[in-house]
Image: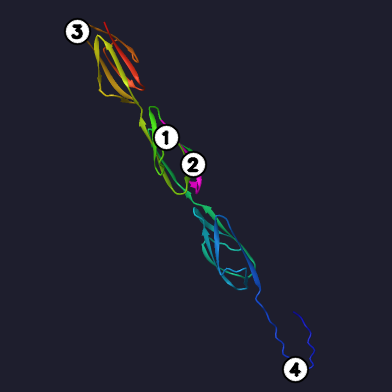
């Protein structure tokens, strides 16, 4: 950039300059950065359009390095070499659970779940019920399932009451039940009355119940066999 000219006559001298070229290093995880124009280097003063492009399930969080802010589309002026990082964060989703006649065990248990989180759900019936199926955003009859959170989801667990048989036996009389049903849901109350045949007297109850009063109430918390004894 420095020379010596010997003036031995009229002379014309031109100095040629080229713009300084600067590098632009872009980095990102869970997304990309689009740049226009897309070049290996940029002359001083060049304007470059940058746009953050998150992958599915992620949100743009902001720029770091030689650029600040949280606008997805920006214009960058190249006045030196620059290194810029686009930061992305996973979207977070609500998991709404509903159950009646039991509960749902969740692992892991969080208020909101990051995109792609795997959640294990287990249907836990309460006493006297049994699990039948899942509903909502899950269709399955398996009591334990794995769910991938890629959007907000609602899951329902369906339970039904256990149903039990009531077997009645008697000799010398009969047993009248109220209500008269082929089977009874868990927790149902059934009234039994011993009615003696002519020439017989009621003696006692036997089997799943006991006592000597001719009218009793049976709570159906399982299958039961009841005998009425007459003498």
**Closer mark to the observer between disc 4 and disc 3:** 3
How far apart marks 4 and 1 lie (CA) works out to 100 Å
Task: Return the residue at label 1.
Answer: 103
Q: Is residue 54 above or below residue 155?
A: below
Query: Residue 60: where, in percent of width, then height?
Result: 52, 57
Q: Is residue 60 above or below residue 128?
A: below
Foreground residue among 193 and 168? 168
**Closer mark to the observer between disc 2 and disc 4:** 2
Describe the element under mark 2 as helix, strand or loop: strand
Quarter holding the N terminus is bottom right
Describe the element under mark 4 as helix, strand or loop: loop
Task: Return the residue at label 3.
Answer: 198
Q: Residues within 10 Å of mark 1 (few under 14, many from 20)?
A: some
Query: Residue 18: where, in percent of width, then height?
Result: 66, 77
Q: Is any part of residue 194 visible from this angle?
A: no
**Closer mark to the observer between disc 3 and disc 2:** 3
Q: Which residues are magenta?
A: 112-125
How far apart marks 3 and 2 lie (CA) works out to 67 Å
Q: Is residue 120 magenta?
A: yes
Task: Return the residue at label 2.
Answer: 119
């Amino acid at each position: 950039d420095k020379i010596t000219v010997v003036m031995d006559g009229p002379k014309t001298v031109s100095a040629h300059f080229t713009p300084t070229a600067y590098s632009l290093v872009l980095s990102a995880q869970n997304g990309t950065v689009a740049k226009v124009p897309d070049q290996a280097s940029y002359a001083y003063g060049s304007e470059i359009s940058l746009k953050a492009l998150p992958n599915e399930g992620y949100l743009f969080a902001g720029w770091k390095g030689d650029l600040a802010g949280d606008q997805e589309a920006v214009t960058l002026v190249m006045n030196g070499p620059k290194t810029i990082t686009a930061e992305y964060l996973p979207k977070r989703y609500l998991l709404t659970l509903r159950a009646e006649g039991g509960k749902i065990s969740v692992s892991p248990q969080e208020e909101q779940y990051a995109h792609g989180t795997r959640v294990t759900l287990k249907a836990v019936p309460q006493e006297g019920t049994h699990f039948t199926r899942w509903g909502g955003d899950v269709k399955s009859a398996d009591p334990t399932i794995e769910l991938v959170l890629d959007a907000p989801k609602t899951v329902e667990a369906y339970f039904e009451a256990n149903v039990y048989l009531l077997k009645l036996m008697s000799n010398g009389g009969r047993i009248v039940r109220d209500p008269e049903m082929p089977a009874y849901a868990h927790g149902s109350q059934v009234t039994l009355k011993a009615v003696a045949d002519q020439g017989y007297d009621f003696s006692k109850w036997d089997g799943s119940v006991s006592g000597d009063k001719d009218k009793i109430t049976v709570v159906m918390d399982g299958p039961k066999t009841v005998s009425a004894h007459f003498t």
